[in-house]
Image: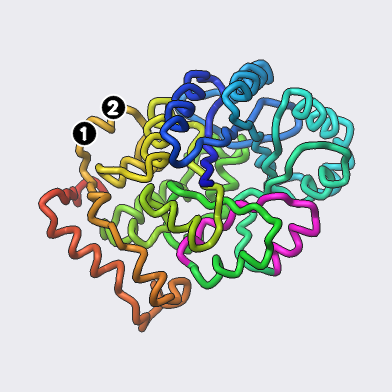
């Protein structure tokens, strides 16, 4: 069975009914919602756009209702400053947080800090431990270590989605759950990724005068030479989700982002759970979709999703060394560029160079 893990702020209970409507169609199942809760010891993503962190009361209401529909809830703890000393100093508060989450009915915690994983694994708790994509787990050696720490599920590195040699080897860990991101995009092998996470998970950095400079820099690079740089990202289309399940046994698929307006989250859920999407691929990426009103417009940047049917076949058959050959001098693979040229000849392709300042 294919399961989706969907981000939420926990403030809109109607998303649960929307998920249930998707589930009644019997295709991809909305199995989990995830999000963060306001608390005194952990910082998490700084939403912006007027969206506040959920209070515990919001999480309680959401979790109780979700359970009635057979949907689980996970909490994100994206604290990147949780050193062993931090854990020891705040041990009582952390234990209280874990106990409270368990009492609320939370299924598990998604951690981005190793000391918190190690500490939680030693506790007598029913909470499942998930290793965040922030940890960039991208080798079998890392997987082995996290498994030994007590991790139940690993959210794979953002950049491993087309490394099929790597994904095939995941079957070596028969008792580990795998999760992969669908619609989170960042320029392939982006050198700024650690800064993206740092800025978006720390309140002080997120509110500084740079206004998320690295994140916006990546945003601009993605739209330059459009659509080549978009094609090089590791997005997964709704139609390609079954491919990852059938070929590699990946069962959990993550739909981002939890700070998106509920109308957009619902839109993402419907598209992915149906395994079929007829529209602008760019509308599935929260990086570019900030407001529901944008769905009503064609937009300056358009990629007909159906034009990418079969796009993954090349990667699966030829196994190109994207990490080394894509951007380096003398790289032999120009597959994405050829596909981009084909897309630009489509009648439905639109681009405004002025919009990206080139």
- Where does residue 272 sit, x and y in percent of width and height? 40, 42
The relative height of residue 101 versus residue 124 in the rendered view (above or below) is above
> Residue at 74% of width from left, 51% of height from top?
151
Does residue 327 appear to the left or right of 32 in the view shown?
Answer: left
- Mark 2 and mark 1 in contact? Answer it, CB < 8 Å: yes
Q: Residues within 10 Å of mark 1 (few under 14, many from 20)?
A: few
- Where does residue 28 sit, x and y in percent of width and height? 46, 41
**Numbered range of the magenta stretch:** 141-162
Q: Quadrant of the C terminus?
A: bottom left
- Where does residue 326 sit, x and y in percent of width and height? 39, 73
| Residue 287 falls within the magenta-colored stretch | no
Which element carries disc 1, helix, strand or loop?
loop
The relative height of residue 63 versus residue 126 in the rendered view (above or below) is above
Mark 1, residue position: 297
Front-lying residue, 308 or 133: 308
Does residue 217 appear to the left or right of 209 in the view shown?
Answer: left
Q: Quadrant of residue 221?
A: bottom left
Front-lying residue, 48 or 260: 260
Which element carries disc 2, helix, strand or loop?
helix
Does residue 319 appear to the left or right of 250 in the view shown?
Answer: left
- Where does residue 293 sit, x and y in percent of width and height? 28, 27
Mark 2, residue position: 293
Q: Quadrant of residue 119?
A: top right
> Residue at 52% of width from left, 19% of height from top?
13
């Amino acid at each position: 069975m294919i399961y989706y893990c969907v981000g939420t702020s926990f403030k809109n209970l109607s998303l649960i009914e929307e998920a249930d409507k998707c589930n009644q169609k019997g295709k991809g199942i909305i199995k989990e919602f995830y999000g963060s809760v306001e608390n005194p010891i952990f910082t998490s993503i700084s939403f912006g756009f007027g969206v506040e962190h959920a209070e515990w009361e919001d999480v309680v209401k959401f979790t109780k209702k979700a359970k009635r529909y057979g949907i689980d809830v996970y909490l994100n703890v994206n604290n990147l400053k949780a050193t062993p000393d931090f854990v020891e100093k705040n041990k009582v508060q952390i234990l209280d947080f874990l106990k409270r989450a368990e009492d609320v009915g939370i299924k598990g915690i998604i951690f981005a800090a190793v000391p918190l994983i190690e500490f939680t694994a030693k506790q007598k708790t029913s909470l499942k431990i998930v290793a965040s994509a922030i940890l960039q787990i991208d080798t079998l050696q890392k997987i082995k270590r996290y498994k030994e720490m007590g991790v139940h599920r690993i959210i794979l590195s953002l950049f491993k989605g087309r490394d099929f040699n790597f994904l095939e080897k995941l079957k070596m860990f028969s008792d580990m759950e795998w999760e992969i991101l669908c619609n989170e995009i960042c320029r392939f092998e982006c050198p700024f990724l650690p800064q993206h996470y740092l800025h978006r998970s720390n309140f002080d950095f997120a509110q500084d005068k740079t206004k998320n400079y690295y994140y916006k820099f990546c945003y601009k690079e993605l739209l330059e030479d459009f659509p080549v740089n978009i094609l090089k990202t590791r997005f997964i289309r709704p139609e390609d989700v079954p491919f990852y399940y059938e070929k590699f046994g990946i069962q959990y698929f993550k739909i981002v982002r939890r700070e998106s307006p509920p109308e957009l989250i619902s839109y993402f859920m419907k598209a992915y759970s149906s395994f079929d999407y007829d529209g602008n691929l760019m509308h599935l990426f929260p990086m570019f979709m900030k407001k529901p009103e944008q769905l009503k417009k064609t937009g300056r940047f358009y990629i007909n999703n159906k034009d990418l049917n079969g796009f993954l076949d090349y990667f699966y058959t030829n196994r190109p060394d994207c990490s080394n050959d894509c951007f380096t001098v003398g790289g032999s693979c120009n597959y994405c560029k050829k596909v981009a040229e084909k897309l630009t000849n489509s009648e439905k392709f639109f681009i405004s160079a002025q919009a990206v300042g080139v």
